[in-house]
Structures are given as structure tokens and as C-alpha cells.
Amino acid sequence: MKTSKFSLLIIIIAFAFCSLIGVNAQEAWVAESASKLVAALIQKGGQQEADELAKIGGEALANEALENAAREGGTALAQRLANLTLENGAGILKVAAGSPSQFISAFDELTPTAQKAVAQAINREPDLMARLFSDFGKDALTAAAQHPGVGTKVMQELGQEGADTLRNVTTDQAIQLCRLAPQLAKVEETQRKTIMEMIGQAPGHVLDLLESHPKVLLTGAGVASFIAAKEQILGGYDIATDENGNVIEVYKPGFIQRMWEFSSDKFKTPLSGLIGVLVLIILLWGCIKLWAIFRIERSKVHMKESELIHTKGK
């Protein structure tokens, strides 16, 4: 019995010793790999790359990122991270350090073109991208790739709401949204959510309105009146605002209705009515002439087609 217990104890100690040796070996490999990676980055990018790397943590950052990668996926994942960094720049280490497996998975899902755009965004703003990726994961990479230079700014101000809206806009509209983002970020959460949904449904129209009427977002009353006019705005109507930014009109008649109203006003006097009738007669005559020309040209085409068919038949 005592022999069995002693044997079990020996096995446990041996296992612990082997594990310790394995850990130490992995730590040594990580340290060596981090040192080699830093040297390779500096050799590739020169002094500028060395300066950029130093700003974000230098060899200590490389060691941390590769160590976390080895912990999550072994030396294979750590080597993959090292390769991505050498290919795309030192900023990759900053963004991937917190969760290398999550970053590599999200990065690999992007197209080569998107990967290039993301790498540029990361190396341009490594601290911001690291924070955004930590908070929003793949959405941060998608925004950076889809709207270079502005997607990250929108997310910085508007978070997940910004990321969701960015999926439904063009880059030009994303630039508009970026300009409005600081004001939108100050709007009460529930109201901001409604406005962001409106932008998502009709981005061009709503963003144009907000930029045309900047006072709307400056007061609670202005925001409330804008939201109250939601159905009309999404229906394509224009708005006007008073000096405080409150929406005071949400109706804009179409061309036909404006012409009808113009005609109705003009017909109030006999002379204006006669002029209006003459204008309508001229318009009607012009339409008849155009229709006649259209029919003649169409007949010519039919005749030409018949001739061609007849010729082929011979």
C-alpha cells in the first residue's frame, strides 16, 4: 500500500517537473522569437519602424503578444502572429496582444484588400485600434477596412451604434457621419439610437438634413422635434428649422403639386387664366407632335427590320 502511494507521488512530481521544463522551454522560445521579430522589423523598416515600435512597447510588447499567442494556440499560433506582424507592421502586436487568437481569426476572414486597409489603419493609430478591437472585435476591423480614415473616428465617438450604421453607408456618407459624430455623441442615448436608426434607413437624406440644419443637434428640443418628424423625414420630405433648431416644417410639395398650386393661383384673374390655358394648349400640342415623331421613327425602324428579314430570306 505504501509502495503504491510512493509510486503515485513520484509520478506526480515527475509530471510537474516535465511541465515546468515545458513551460520554461516555451518561455525561452517566446523570448528568443520576440527578440528575432523586433530585429527583423527594424531591419525591414529602418529607424522609423524602430521608433514606432518603441512608442507602442518595443520588445516587451512583442514578448507579451507572442506569449499570449503561445498560451492560446501553442507555438504555431505565436509563429503565425510573428509572420503577420513582419508582413503588416509592428502595430499588429499592439492590437493582437490582448487576444491573439481572436485577432488572427477576425483578420483572416477579411479579403486581402481589406487586410491591407486594416493594417494601414492599425499602423496609423495602433492605440486607438487596440482599444476599438478590445471593445468591439471584428466590427472595428470591418469599419477600418470599409471606410479608411473615418470608420475608426466614427466608432471612437459612437461605439457599436457607429459600427452598425457604417455597414449601411457609402464612404462619402461615412465622412458626413464623421463630421456629425461629436454632436451625435452628446445626444441622449435613447434619442441618439433613434437618429442612428434613421440614418441607417435613409443615410443620404437624413445626413444631408442634419448637416443642412446643424442647430437640430444642439438642443434637446431640436432633437425631439427632429425625431417627431421621423415618418415625414424618412418619407423623403425636407425640413426647416427655427432659430433654436426646432423643426417647424416637414412638408415639401412635389413638382406636379407645385405646378398645380401655381396654376391655381394664376387662374384667379381672367388674364392669368387665359395665359394659363394658352400655355396648356402649347404643351399639349408639343406632346402630340412628339408622339407623332415617335410613331414615325418607330415605323421606320419596323420597316428597316422587315427589309433585313426579307433580304436574309432570299
Image (cartoon, grey):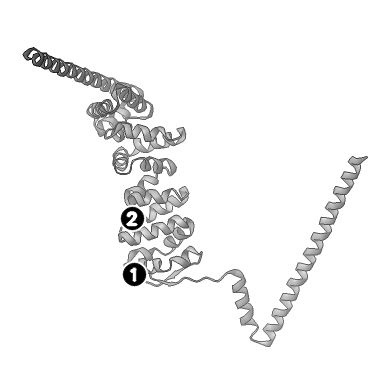
Query: What is the crowding at mark 2: few (fewer than 14 residues within 10 Å), some, or many (at least 20)?
Result: some
Q: Is residue 7 left or right of residue 105?
A: left
In the rendered image, the residue lying farthest to the left is 2
Write down the quadrant of residue 197 in the picture.
bottom left
For the C terminus, the image quarter is top right
Nearest the viewer among 238 and 142 is 142
Residue at 64% x, 78% y is 263
Q: Is residue 71 left or right of residue 154?
A: left
Q: Which mark is residue 144?
A: none
Circle 2 SS class: helix
> Compared with residue 295, is residue 15 higher up or lower down, i.e. above or below?
above
Residue at 32% x, 67% y is 220
Q: Position of residue 209 (x, y in %)?
A: 45, 62
> Compared with residue 179, is residue 221 higher up or lower down, i.e. above or below?
below
Nearest the viewer among 218 and 7 is 7
Q: Position of residue 250 (x, y in %)?
A: 47, 70
Write down the quadrant of residue 309 in the picture.
top right
Q: Amino acid at mark 1?
A: Ala
Q: Amino acid at mark 2?
A: Pro
Circle 1 SS class: helix
Q: CA distance from mark 1 to mark 2?
A: 18 Å
Q: Is residue 185 left or right of residue 171?
A: left
Q: Position of residue 261 (x, y in %)?
A: 60, 77
Q: Position of residue 287 (x, y in %)?
A: 75, 67
In the rendered image, the residue lying farthest to the bottom is 270
- Mark 1 or mark 2: whose residue is earlier in sequence: 2
> Compared with residue 130, is residue 46 higher up or lower down, i.e. above or below?
above
According to the image, label 2 marks what residue? Answer: 182
According to the image, label 1 marks what residue? Answer: 221
In the rendered image, the residue lying farthest to the top is 3
Write down the quadrant of residue 253 in the picture.
bottom right
For the N terminus, the image quarter is top left
